[in-house]
Image (cartoon, rainbow, N blue to C red):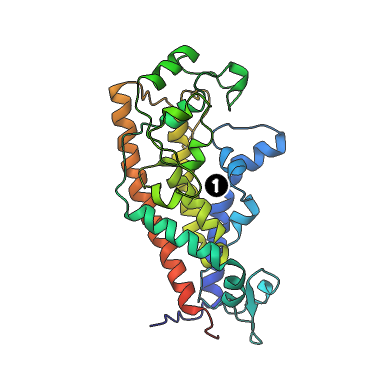
């Protein structure tokens, strides 16, 4: 049964677009100002260097597939949009799937597998520790950030724990000495078979996948995915071996460490993981729903 959403009247969808732009501007304000004055925030700015999404792209609102927008001739030059003679715009799904069908299939399968697999809450963020294991100060990824407990103690934490990283894009940054210590050998090919919702990097990546699907994902879902990625990034760095207490989080307060080398720190980290897993799966459902609606409307005229 194909769902045919009612056309969005000009006032209604313009209000949504305006609200989206205001929210996106607020979320990106800090980064844009730092870029203007040539400063960097090693925690927040990661999202803009690791993921290839620009603030201007995040600001662009899409209603999702199958939603006609009345009086929207200004979208005639937007990629993957079609505007009819009445000025009603909609996502051109035939053109979109002609180019992006393989990406859609991959993302849908990966998100579904990640959501359905039992989450794991025992890694304690040790991937960040494995990335600096037995490194010299000039070799660490975040040069300029001190290690919270020093190099030798950091190495000892890695050596005294079982490393169980399931995420390839974290594992590939392990130092050569740390990689053999991981229980698994994640690869790009095994990603769909290993990804699980307890992984903080998999939670951040919901934002990446939503962005890759472009106009078929409603803008509100994309911004929610960005907020989740931002919140996870803060927790990831708080639990890392780096001392980030000199930086503030999104709420304006200093980033307090999560000492995962201690029992209380492990409990705090696992509790955060559970919350992120729930939020990530809720967003995975929203993205999968957007994909399902888009697939229903391929080949359906306006």
Kindly tell me whether residue 30 is visible in this rendering: yes
Q: Is residue 238 above or below residue 29?
A: above
155 sits to left or right of 301 = left
The answer to which image quadrant residue 73 occupies is bottom right
Which residue is labeled 1 in the image? 27
Quadrant of the frame with the N terminus: bottom left
Quadrant of the frame with the C terminus: bottom right
Kindly tell me whether residue 253 is visible in this rendering: no
Which residue is at a point 62% across and 79% down the rendered structure image? Answer: 71
158 sits to left or right of 23 = left
Residue 249 percent location from the top left of the image: 49, 34
How crowded pointer 1 is (Cα within 10 Å; few <14, some 14-19, many 20+) is rated as some
182 sits to left or right of 74 = left
Residue 253 percent location from the top left of the image: 46, 30
Q: Is residue 269 above or below residue 53?
A: above
Residue 260 percent location from the top left of the image: 36, 25
Q: How many marks?
A: 1
Considering depth in this image, is 204 or 171 the residue closer to the camera? 171
Which residue is at a point 37% across and 56% down the rendered structure image? Answer: 113
Q: In the structure shown, which secondary structural element does the residue marked by tag 1 occupy? A: helix
Which residue is at a point 51% across and 72% down the rendered structure image? Answer: 65
Which residue is at a point 54% across and 33% down the rendered structure image? Answer: 173
Residue 37 percent location from the top left of the image: 71, 34
Q: Is residue 52 above or below residue 73?
A: above
């Amino acid at each position: 049964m194909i769902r045919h959403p009612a056309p969005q009247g000009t006032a209604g969808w313009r209000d949504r677009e305006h609200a989206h732009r205001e929210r996106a501007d607020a979320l990106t304000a800090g980064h844009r100002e730092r870029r203007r004055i040539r400063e960097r925030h090693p925690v927040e700015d990661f999202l803009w260097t690791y993921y290839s999404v620009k603030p201007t792209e995040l600001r662009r609102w899409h209603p999702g597939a199958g939603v006609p927008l009345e009086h929207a001739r200004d979208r005639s030059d937007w990629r993957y949009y079609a505007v009819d003679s009445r000025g009603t715009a909609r996502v051109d799904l035939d053109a979109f799937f002609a180019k992006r069908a393989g990406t859609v299939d991959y993302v849908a399968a990966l998100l579904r597998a990640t959501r359905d697999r039992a989450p794991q809450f025992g890694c304690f963020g040790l991937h960040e520790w494995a990335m600096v294991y037995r490194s010299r100060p000039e070799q660490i990824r975040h040069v300029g950030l001190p290690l919270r407990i020093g190099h030798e103690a950091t190495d000892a934490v890695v050596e005294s724990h079982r490393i169980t990283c399931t995420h390839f894009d974290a594992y590939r940054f392990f130092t050569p000495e740390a990689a053999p210590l991981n229980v698994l050998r994640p690869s790009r090919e095994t990603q769909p078979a290993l990804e699980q919702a307890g992984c903080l990097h998999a939670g951040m990546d919901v934002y990446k996948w939503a962005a890759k699907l472009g106009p078929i994902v409603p803008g509100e879902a994309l911004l929610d995915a960005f907020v989740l990625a931002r919140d996870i990034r803060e927790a990831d760095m708080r639990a890392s071996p780096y001392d980030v207490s000199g930086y503030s989080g999104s709420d304006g307060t200093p980033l307090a460490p999560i000492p995962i080398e201690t029992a209380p720190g492990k409990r705090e980290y696992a509790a955060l993981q559970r919350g992120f897993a729930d939020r990530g799966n809720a967003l995975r459902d929203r993205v999968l729903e957007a994909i399902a609606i888009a697939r229903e409307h391929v080949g359906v005229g306006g």
